[in-house]
Image (spheres, rainbow, N blue to C red):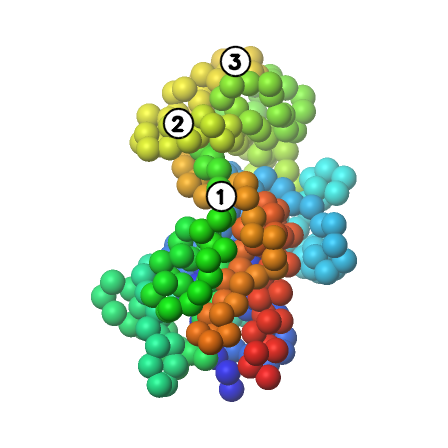
Amino acid sequence: MSKIAIIGAGMAGLAAAGRLAARGVASVIFEKSRGFGGRMATRRTGDLQFDHGAQFFTARGPDFFAQVSRWREAGVVDEWATGSYVGAPGMSAPARAMAPRHACVTQAQVSRLVRAESGWSVCDESGEISAPGNGSYDSVVLAVPAPQAIPLAASAGARMPELAHVEYAPCIALMLAFPLAIHGPLENWLKPDDRTIAWMARNSSKPGRPADAQTWVVHARPDWSREHLEITADDLRAPLLAAFRAVTGILTEPTHVSAHRWRYALVEQAVGVPCLFDADAMVGACGDWCLGPRVESAYDSGCAMADTLLKSLA
């Protein structure tokens, strides 16, 4: 039986693994963090939770709409507004529902790929990572941001020059919690005409969220995020909180303030093809950077990657 290593447990990697599994091909997923979903992330702090990455997603194509319908039936996705869907009880819920069907190795910081007669090995700085079948994988899928895929593809000798042309915008996210009784904007989300803030959402307005606090997630504009990307998260809180207060008029002191830096948040320049594949190396790459900055694009790219692999293996 063919065995595939997938680097990255975001939507693209999980979609590829699911498609392969449906065709009887086993895979092992390597993920550098403790959880699943990539930028479909949920930050939990005590009784609070924040969707500090992707805020919602849409479903335009029939394949992804069918998947969203299955998620809704399973209770891991709900509609926030007409045509705008969120994971429930957090944005990472669909990814967590997808992941248990596959062998997953978390907190695995993959640094290189090594090929021998027996197959591919996935390695960190200490050597081969302990995982089922490592050292005998028939193929490797790089389901990570393009800048992270470049050195891994190079270590494998895989030719993917398109990766170098992908461009990202960073995003700094601010997470705020307030008492329920505070008064502020009536909208569940805002795109203010502001130099600092691109988007803000009342996280607690989403279905399935805790109802004991009013929580907000604020995303800074790409240009502001670029300018402040190397500042520590603690030092980012004050200027973003000041901008939030200026936009919303909420002057109440928050009960929680934290910030997160997304270095590869929004794809600005995509490759324009569903996935990349070097048939000689048997190494592929997929992600939203292939088709565009949407959750659906990551899902479609992962499925296309799986279909390409299945044809090659056949």
On residue 241, the disc is none
Q: CA distance from mark 2 to mark 3?
A: 20 Å
Q: CA distance from mark 2 to mark 1?
A: 16 Å
Decide which of tag 2 and tag 1 comes sooner along the chain: 1
Between 218 and 149, which is closer to the camera in this rendering?
149
Badge 3 amino acid = Ala
Residue positioned 63% across, 75% down in the render = 22
In depth, the one of 7 and 310 nearer the eye is: 310
Task: Report if the CB atoms under discs 2 and 3 are less than 8 Å apart.
Answer: no
Q: Secondary structure at mark 2?
A: helix
Give the mark, 3 or 1, whose residue is nearer the N terminus.
1
Image quadrant of residue 120?
A: bottom left
Q: Nearer the viewer, mark 2 or mark 3?
A: 2
Residue located beneath label 2 in the image: 227
Does 134 appear above or below 208?
below
In the picture, the quarter occupied by the C terminus is bottom right
Q: Quadrant of residue 198?
A: top right
CB atoms at circles 3 and 1 under 8 Å apart? no
Is residue 158 toward the left or the right of residue 200 in the image? left
Residue 115 image point, x, y percent:
35, 77
Please name the amino acid that badge 2 sits on.
Glu
Report the amino acid beneath label 1.
Glu
Q: Dot 3: few (<14), some (14–19), or many (≥20) neighbours within 10 Å? A: few
The label number, if any, that marks residue 246 in the structure image: 3
216 sits to left or right of 8 = right
Q: Which mark is residue 167?
A: 1
Name the residue nearer the viewer: 188 or 10. 10
Frontmost of labels 3 and 1 is 1
Label 2 vs 3, first from the N-terminus: 2
